[in-house]
Image (cartoon, rainbow, N blue to C red):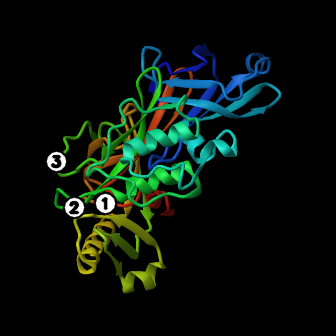
Amino acid sequence: MLEATPKICIEGREVDFLKGGYKNDGNLTSASLSFTLPLTFAGLKKLWNKEVTFFLSKHDSVPIFRGWIRRIKETFSEVELYAEDALGYMSKGGEETEAKVNLTNFDNLDGLTAGACIQELLLKIKLNNKLKTDTIGDTDPLLHTSSPFRGTMVALDIVKELLGRAINTDGDLPRPNIGRIVDDGEYSQFIIELESDLETSTPKIIFTEKYNIKDISITKKRIPTVIIVNGDNTSGRFIHDGALEALDRTYLEVENKSLKSPAECKEFGAKVFEANAKNQYEYKIVLIGGGYLLENDVIQVATDDPEFSGIFRIVGKSISFSPTDYSIAVMINRKPPTLAQYISSRDN
């Protein structure tokens, strides 16, 4: 554990917590914060849906986490609270109607860019008071909602599909666009950015077993065996028969408007499969330091084992903490281009 002074505030007021844990798996899943308060404080207050902020240090001006209390569990001496960030409201909502939108031929998202579409979507589900889009940006390449969304849909599913359609092909390997939440010190902001390039990005920190790595473990992800590629008024399907027989049928759908024929789409699908097959391992490292690393940041790991060494991308982070110290673990990988919702499925 590192010596520190973590801080939790409810509605802007600092509270004396007993212990806590923060978890963010990335990939458009909601981050969560669980912590306990003495019953003498929490038992006298209405805390459900109150805003919670978590700071790694009392001196920080920007929180690691901003969310809202979703569950409260009382014992004889303390109260355990569970909070989720704004993405939790996009996937489940405080009420079911908050997370879904009904789109028709007269009330829809047609013709908007991905960024503008997400902004309009947040207005429709009335989440713009919890999740701002002042610096949202847009996808690279620019993507319009050419394929209409209709019917009653989960808001987060629309966001995932939009980002999954936009694949950048400027480099040697195609790269997806990702969405994530950053905090500006006052609000949670949803931003869109291109997934970091491990070949050209400068690592923010170097981690070594001698100085700042406490433990390393491996998770093996499932890889897609059927890849559907949508091109410019065309599509193609790549199926790896050997992998399909060995690993079962797992689908992945991407979009690349530069492709003009089914053959080009199928060839692109083969490249996506190869990239996934070569990079199917995800690593969890327990660190000394690294608490301020964010999803899509790039780090370098230097160990005596070449399997663990190299340049990696941050995909998730967890923190366990008390009022005086904390422990950090990050999930890292060399993730190839895939849909955000697919990556959350792993073989353990």
Q: Residue 96: tell me if it is visible.
A: yes
Q: Earlier in the sequence, mark 3 or mark 2?
A: 2
CA gap between label 3 and label 1 equals 15 Å
Identify which residue, 273 or 157, lies in the foreground.
157
- Would you say 142 lies left or right of 247 here? left
Residue 298 - label:
none
Tell me where residue 149 appears, x and y as whole percent. 50, 57
Q: Nearer the viewer, mark 3 or mark 2?
A: 2
Q: Contact, CB < 8 Å: mark 1 with mark 2?
A: yes
Tell me where residue 25 appears, x and y as whole percent. 48, 47
Picture layout, residue 344 above or below residue 228: above
Q: Residue 317: tell me if it is visible.
A: no
Residue found 39% across the figure and 47% down from its top: 112
Three-letter amino acid code at the position of disc 2: Leu
Q: Most extreme residue toward the front, as rendered? A: 106
Residue 173 - label:
2
Q: Earlier in the sequence, mark 3 or mark 1?
A: 3
Picture layout, residue 183 above or below residue 178: above
Pointer 1: residues within 10 angstroms few (<14), some, or many (20+)?
Answer: many
CA gap between label 1 and label 2 equals 8 Å
Tell me where residue 277 appears, x and y as whole percent. 33, 70
Residue found 63% across the figure and 46% down from its top: 92
Identify which residue, 208 or 15, lies in the foreground.
15
Pointer 3: residues within 10 angstroms few (<14), some, or many (20+)?
Answer: few
Disc 3 element: loop
Residue 41 image-quadrant placement: top right
Q: Say which residue label 1 marks.
A: 336
Q: Contact, CB < 8 Å: mark 3 with mark 1?
A: no
Residue 200 - label:
3
Residue found 56% across the figure and 43% down from its top: 90
